[in-house]
């Protein structure tokens, strides 16, 4: 059935200016978040004031068991409200005002990497239920001094909070699904290689490739250009000192491929970054995706050659056939401003269109040491916007294997 071409019209300058002006008004909210920071300081003062009062009454012997329990619950209540403030300050600012550049920071909250309005609302509702639980527990601990109608209404209000949180969590699933379908519809001109299904259905373990045939899988693995065939199952999880196993296990389901997200492995040499990147690439091949692997130096040479031949745009468009591109060893070789601009075009072209897997010995915040020119910050911004950053800390596995026989001999 023939398709009817759609005619797209660029917005008028007046509409564009008005849109930018309205969007810029989000900065009016910035002072509100600083006000919440001041409110958090008030709660810090309240916490230590309550703690000091509790310690004095315990030292002087004027603290009963009930008083201690109520005082501790007050402290817990203050801490939970302070946690709620942190969630609103950081998550709300990140969602509605401007991104906070914490990618690669070892203390980055787990939920901050994928925060959005739906996730934030569910987490806030859960925090409010927790605070309500503490208040209700305080009433029951001091039940002899709490009126019955206060207990009744406290229980009813708490159940209302629970019901509203459950409804909100239930509704956030379909809302996120509709948003994802809209995202796919927006980028229908550049569909991924795999069908847009549920990530759990897209994932095909290595042992289940017989349905498609080993030939197709092996052809994709050979075409990917891996330096060696490495599997996620063969990774030595006990070697790194610090390693997020849960995140890598989640990445192994290939959700990031269907969602067109990026993966960045950061760590010293020899900690297994390339192994994990190749393992994800092999698993993507087993699931039916086309993958292409090359080191950063090889990608630089490939892009520079395409630019010299006047076909850089065609080269980038041709890479759209690959659902996953792997850029290995970023940081081992510094690049000049011209090469950095080429990498920026690669990252910008893949942005929200297909997945990138990158390995580097330096966190994203230090990529200005690798790439010269003004393109580094813009490249990191696009790469990290939809990315899972996995930090691996430890000694070199290769050096460990090389020195262990000599250590066994007592040398």
Image (cartoon, rainbow, N blue to C red):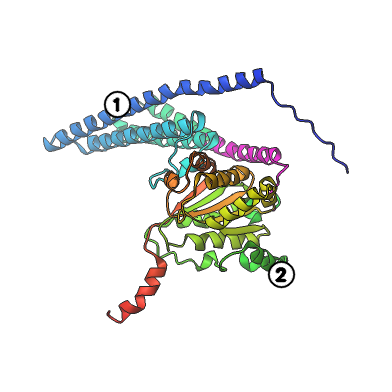
Disc count in the image?
A: 2
> What residue is pinned by disc 2?
215
State the image coordinates of residue 240 (x, y, percent, origin top left): 40, 62
Q: Residue furthest left?
A: 60
- Magenta stretch bounds: 165-193
Q: Split into 4 quadrants, where in the image is the N terminus? A: top right
Q: Secondary structure at mark 2?
A: helix
Magenta stretch encompasses residue 117: no
> What residue is pinned by disc 1?
42
State the image coordinates of residue 243 (x, y, percent, origin top left): 42, 57
Instruction: Mark yes or no: residue 150 visible.
Output: yes
Please, what is the dominant secondary structure of the magenta stretch?
Answer: helix
Tell me which label, 2 or 1, sits earlier in the chain: 1
Cα–Cα gap, marks 2 and 1 = 66 Å
Q: Is 133 situated above or below 296?
A: above
State the image coordinates of residue 387 (x, y, percent, origin top left): 52, 46
Q: Nearer the viewer, residue 39 or 280?
A: 280
Please name the residue shown 35% across and 28% down the image: 37
């Amino acid at each position: 059935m023939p398709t009817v071409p759609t005619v797209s019209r660029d917005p008028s300058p007046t509409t564009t200016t008005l849109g930018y002006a309205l969007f810029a008004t989000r900065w009016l909210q910035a002072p509100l978040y600083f006000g919440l920071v001041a409110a958090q300081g008030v709660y810090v003062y309240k916490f230590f004031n309550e703690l000091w009062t509790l310690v004095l009454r315990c030292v002087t012997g004027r603290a009963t068991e009930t008083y201690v329990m109520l005082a501790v619950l007050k402290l817990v209540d203050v801490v939970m409200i302070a946690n709620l403030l942190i969630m609103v300050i950081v998550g709300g600012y990140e969602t509605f005002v401007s991104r906070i550049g914490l990618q690669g920071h070892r203390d980055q909250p787990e939920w901050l990497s994928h925060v959005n309005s739906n996730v934030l609302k569910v987490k806030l509702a859960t925090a409010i239920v927790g605070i309500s639980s503490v208040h209700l527990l305080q009433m029951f601990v001091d039940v002899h001094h709490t009126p019955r109608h206060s207990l009744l209404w406290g229980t009813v209000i708490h159940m209302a909070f629970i019901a509203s949180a459950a409804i909100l969590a239930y509704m956030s699933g379909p809302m996120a699904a509709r948003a994802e379908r809209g995202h796919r519809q927006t980028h229908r001109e550049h569909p991924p290689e795999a069908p847009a299904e549920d990530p759990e259905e897209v994932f095909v373990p290595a042992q289940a490739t017989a349905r498609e045939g080993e030939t197709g899988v092996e052809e994709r693995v050979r075409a990917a250009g891996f330096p060696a065939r490495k599997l996620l199952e063969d990774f030595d999880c006990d070697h790194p000192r610090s390693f997020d196993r849960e995140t890598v296990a989640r990445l192994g389901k290939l959700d990031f491929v269907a969602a067109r997200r990026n993966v960045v492995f950061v760590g010293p040499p020899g900690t297994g970054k390339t192994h994990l990147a190749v393992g994800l690439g092999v698993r993507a091949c087993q699931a039916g995706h086309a993958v292409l692997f090359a080191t950063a130096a090889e990608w630089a040479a490939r892009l520079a050659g395409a630019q010299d031949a006047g076909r850089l745009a065609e080269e980038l468009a041709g890479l759209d056939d690959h659902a996953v591109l792997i850029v290995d060893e970023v940081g081992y070789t510094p690049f000049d401003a011209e090469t950095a601009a080429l990498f920026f075009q690669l990252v910008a072209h893949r942005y929200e269109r297909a997945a990138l897997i990158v390995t580097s010995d330096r966190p994203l915040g230090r990529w200005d040491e690798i790439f010269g020119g003004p393109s580094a910050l813009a490249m990191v911004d696009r790469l990290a916007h939809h990315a899972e950053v996995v930090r691996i800390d430890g000694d070199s596995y290769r050096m460990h294997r090389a020195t262990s026989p000599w250590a066994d001999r007592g040398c």
